[in-house]
Amino acid sequence: MTAVRMPAAPRPAPAQRGRLSAAARLLRLELRRNAMPWVLPVAAGLFWFTTYRKAMAVPPLWNLRAASLQSGALLAFVCPVAGAAAWMGSREARRHTTDLVTITARPRWTRQLAIWAATTCWVILGYLGCVAALYGMTAEQASWGGPLWWPVAVVAASLAALSALGFAAGTLVPSRFTAPVAAVAAFFALALSTQLINGSQSYWQISPIVTAPWDIGPDAGAGAFYPYLPDLSIAQVMFLTGLTMAVLGAMALPNGSGRRWLLRPAAAVTTAGLLAAGTAVALAGTGKLDVHGMIAIPALHDAASDRPLRYTPVCSHTAIPVCLNPAYASYLPAAAAALAPVLNEIAGLPGAPVRISQAAATFRQGPGNSVSVSLADPPLSGTPPVFRLLLPNQLPGTAMTTSGFAAAVRSSAGPAIVASVIGDGPSTFPAQQAVAAALSRSAGLPQPSLPGPVMQRRNTTVPLPAPVRSAARRFAALPSPARHAWLVRHLAALRAGRITLAHLP
Amino acid sequence: MTAGTTGEMPGAAAPGGKTWPAWPPRAGTRLLRLHAISRRVPAAIAAIAACAIGLRIALIGHWDTYGALQLPLVFEAGSAAAIAITTASPLGEPERVTGRWLPFLRLATALALTAAAAAALIAAGAGAHLAGGRLDVLRNVAGMTGIGLLCAAVLGGGLAWVGPTGYLVVGAYALYTQWHRPALTTPWIWPARPPHDAGAAICAALVFTIGIVVISVRGARDPVGE
């Protein structure tokens, strides 16, 4: 044996780089062999059917569309992602390749993480496509504001968590029945989790389909007058991220799931995840309904969010301008047309408002899940007087068509505007009632009525007395300029009660 | 394993010239049993039983109107998915080529499991407030099973759960629209229709029949890859 001079072996590439490229290669393999792309069309179809159509039916307000996106997209994706992840998790056992891959160089946990990451990548990709479609269309339609990204982040974090939970279920119980059970169980847990919410200080608000105080639906005014509060979204993302970490970390803990050196980091990740999730649940329990209709969590609250947003209102060219928040600009023609007749009647009268201005709603938590929504200040205030109104779609209820919206504005704001000028309340004099009825008749508004007797049920009304109705008919029959001229001269006396029914022309 | 693979059975001449196996007394039972085991029917029955027990436990709680209507649908979808998954064959092409009794075995399995699921869920609701009642359960289980069977023919037995679970979301959404208008009233979304609605029953029966026929004749699609 002789000594032979051998050239020095080239220095091996840094281990870190090799490890990364191997991980990327593994991820690429898993992306190609994943079940999620097969299931994505179903998820996309469900998204279109349950979320996109519904979101397009509501006004193009970013907060409404974002709330629809959060709850709708989550429910559309929950079954596909949980089921597909469980299916992928049980792959090795179903194909009887567990022993074959156990002897490979990579720890089992690394392989599992690659499968989970590939499944999550596919579902996030599909979800982002849905977000792009919905937000792209909203950007074209919306007149003011911008996209809200916290709801998007909540759904993305939810999909990662559901993928982890489904994958863990498939790994632990590798049966062909695991996938459907995981899909149905995930839907059950998510859709029915809101049944336990009671009031705004509920731990169950951590459920990622909750976007606002439960049972009143999305608030159209949230994010239009005051900044959108991300408090609840932050807690939800924290919870979901913690849950994902805990589940993925726990998968490395069973014997044989990885190398020994993995156990400590995995245990640390699991513990950190559980702590984060627990903290987030505790934070959600401290949330409460703020006056602007959003859930505020004191520990996560930014005081700057309480300052109103600055905006230039959009106004109509009616006898008295109707001014709305620019986010509601698409409603201006309908609102102005609905109020124009009554504004023509009262324009120029002493004490009449110089502007009809949309105001922010004030929210108060009632017993259980009930919430009262009202104006913070009296409708008519300021010098010169400004009449503040809430649009019908700022109140809890179902979405309205344009004609329904106009009718609601006419029947709610119209009488209130007349009453604010002529006089209002149970102590009004008969002449005031007659003039208010006459103006309402001329403007095509619903006829005013009087509150029912105290003994009767609340909110019952009785028609005006016959003499009042007769005087109202007489006054309404006057030509509009004559009626207006008489009111200009006698409105102060009318309000003071110095005019009787007999004095009315 | 099916009859075609037990090649040592004595044959008898059929009128058409084909040779049909003359069955030993217990061969039919054995064939059924083997087919059921190969399709994980016992596990499917266990899953259906779990759904029924889950429904019974859930019915103990107090649910609002919407939750009460949605609740049975969740367990009906779970049962339908379990039935659809039994269509996956572990034997693949060899069985398809040689098993001449296979269509009848598939038909019998699907029909028996659907009947078992409907019976189990109806029994689970006995004595409790089962929103929609028995007819609702029967219609929904049959319709969603039909969707699952059709999905098995397209995607393969392993992924057949996608159909019933996807339809669960559609059904739950349609129920939601009963409270948040405009309501979805098409009979093709039968979970949102009243139990005695003829159109919804016909649609569910039609889907179930087509699903049964397709899966009996063609079987589930063999998975090419995932």
Image (cartoon, grey):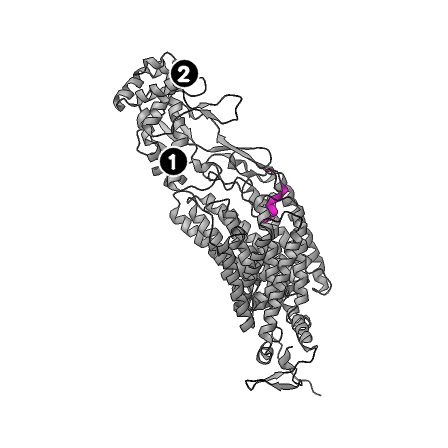
> How many other residues sit within 10 Å of disc 1, few (<14), some (14-19) or many (≥20)?
some
Q: Residue at the spot x=59%, y=45% of the render?
A: A194
Can residue A80 be seen in the rendering of this structure? no
Task: Tell me which amino acid carries mark 2.
Answer: Phe
In the picture shown, does residue B179 fall above or below A346? Answer: below
Magenta stretch: includes residue A460: no
Q: Residue at the spot x=56%, y=55% of the render?
A: A78
In the picture shown, does residue B98 fall above or below A109? Answer: below
Q: Are marks 2 and 1 on the same chain?
A: yes
B211 and A498: which is toward the camera: B211
Q: Chain of mark 2?
A: A
Number of numbered markers:
2
> How many other residues sit within 10 Å of disc 2, few (<14), some (14-19) or many (≥20)?
many
Q: Position of residue A267 (x, y in %)?
A: 70, 56
Identify the mark nearer the N-term, 2 or 1. 1
Which circle marks residue A325 in the picture?
Answer: none
Asked whether the beta carbons under mark 2 and mark 1 sit within 8 Å of each other, the answer is no
Magenta stretch: includes residue A193: yes
Which circle marks residue A407 in the picture?
Answer: 1
Instruction: Name the quarter where the C terminus of chain A is drawn.
Output: top left
Per the image, label 2 sits on a secondary structure element best described as loop
Report, in whole angstroms, how far the alpha carbon at label 2 lies from the one at label 1: 28 Å
Instruction: Name the quarter where the N terminus of chain A is drawn.
Output: bottom right
Q: Chain of mark 1?
A: A
Give the residue number, with chain letter if any, for mark 2: A429
